[in-house]
Every structure is written in structure tokens, then in C-alpha cells.
Amino acid sequence: MDSFKELASRRRSHRKYSSQPVTEEELKTILGAALMSPTAKGLRKWHFVVTQDQERISRLGGIRTFGSSFLAGAPAVIAVLGEPSSQEMWIEDGAIAAVSMQYQAEDLGLGSCWCQVRGRESCEEGVSAEELVRRILDVGEKYSVLCLVAVGHPEDVRQPQDEAALKWDQVEWK
Ligand SMILES: Cc1cc2nc3c(=O)[nH]c(=O)nc-3n(C[C@H](O)[C@H](O)[C@H](O)COP(=O)(O)O)c2cc1C
């Protein structure tokens, strides 16, 4: 990558991945981007659960009736958790960490996609998507689950952002 501008333009969500594993070094680089990301009051209260366990990943793919199935083919999934009892801005902190990981993955030539967990129903009636993630990844009680970020070598071809279609009309200059 030549610049952040080019990275921002190239980053798209990838939902199909080859079977090539993501190396531990790549995962550490991606997690490092999360751990360096800005947090409200500098509290750094996020928590991340990384799994390359295909049985767990396959179950994560089935947590929602729509929007999670792409996870099942991913070589690695990172759950982004927060501690609402000690960081009221855990959602903002987690979102920034998740997106930082997505840009770092792109920079490594990897693809990624966010799967929303917070506030979503699961495919089991009356059970939240978060509850299923808790069971699958043994998430401790003090944490809340924001999202899952899948990472892998992309197999779907995505075009870069169309700069001519950017919503400049939604930007006010005063
Ligand atoms: C807060 C948030 C929630 C998202 N939830 C999902 C999801 O549950 N499933 C999914 O396939 N993609 C999800 N995405 C990815 C978006 O669909 C994607 O970013 C959007 O369509 C724009 O495409 P792009 O990332 O290729 O630019 C989510 C993205 C964000 C930021």
C-alpha cells in the first residue's frame, strides 16, 4: 500500500475466503492494530477472543438467520467484546478497534468482514445472537459482545470504492 488513502479506497468487505490459513504473525499484527486503537478516556477496556477452531467457526456462522453465514468459511474469527460496567463507551471503543483490524487486514492483503452481534436476534427464538456467541466462545459474564470480525485470504473479487459516488452531499462546510 502506498498510502492510507489507497488503503481506505481498497478496503471492502470480503465474505468468501480460500482455505489458506492466516498465520499467527498476521493475526498478531491485526490484533496489534486493535490494541493500539484509540479509546474513550484511554481506558482500553476491550477484550478479544480469537478462534481458528473450525468447529467453533462453523457454529458462529449459524448464529443468525441472515448475515452470519459467511463466517463459516473463514480461517479465523475475532470476537470484539467490551466491559459495559467499567466503560460506558464500550460500543464506540469496540467499533474503532474492529475497523482498525479491518484496515490492518487489508494492508496485509487479507480480507475481512464485520458480523453484527450486539442487539441482534439469533436463529433460535427468544435467544440473542450474543447468547449464542457466549456459549460457543465461553465468553465471561463481565463482557458484552459487539461483533465478530472474520479474516482470511479473499476469494471474492471486490472493486475499490467508487470515488465518484462518494456522498459529498452529506458533508457540510461551514
Ligand atoms: C456496524 C456494522 C455492522 C455490520 N454487520 C454485518 C453483518 O452482520 N453481516 C455482514 O455480512 N456484513 C455486515 N457489515 C458489513 C457491511 O455490510 C459493509 O461494510 C457494507 O455493506 C459496506 O460494504 P464495504 O465494507 O465493502 O464497503 C457490517 C458493517 C458494519 C459497520
Image: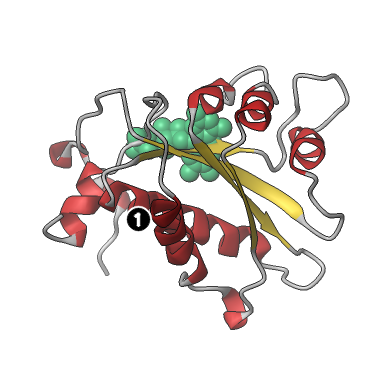
Which residue occupies 56% across, 36% down?
115
Secondary structure beneath label 1: helix
Name the side, left or right, on which 119 lies relative to 161.
right
Residue 56: x and y, percent?
68, 31
Which residue occupies 37% across, 35% down?
13
Residue 124: x and y, percent?
82, 20
The kind of residue tagged 1 is Gln
Q: Quadrant of residue 19?
A: top left
Name the side, left or right, on which 131 lies relative to 163.
right
| Label 1 beta carbon less than 8 Å to ligand 1 | no
- Where is 112 relative to 73, above or below? below
Residue 4: x and y, percent?
21, 60
Residue assigned mark 1: 104
Task: Give the camera-side residue of 132 and 22.
Answer: 22
What is the quadrant of the C terminus in the image?
bottom left
What is the quadrant of the N terminus in the image?
bottom left
Label 1 crowd (10 A; few <14 / some 14-19 / many >=20)? many
Residue 142: x and y, percent?
84, 60
Name the side, left or right, on which 137 lies relative to 25.
right
- Where is 149 relative to 42, above or below? above
Q: How many marks?
A: 1
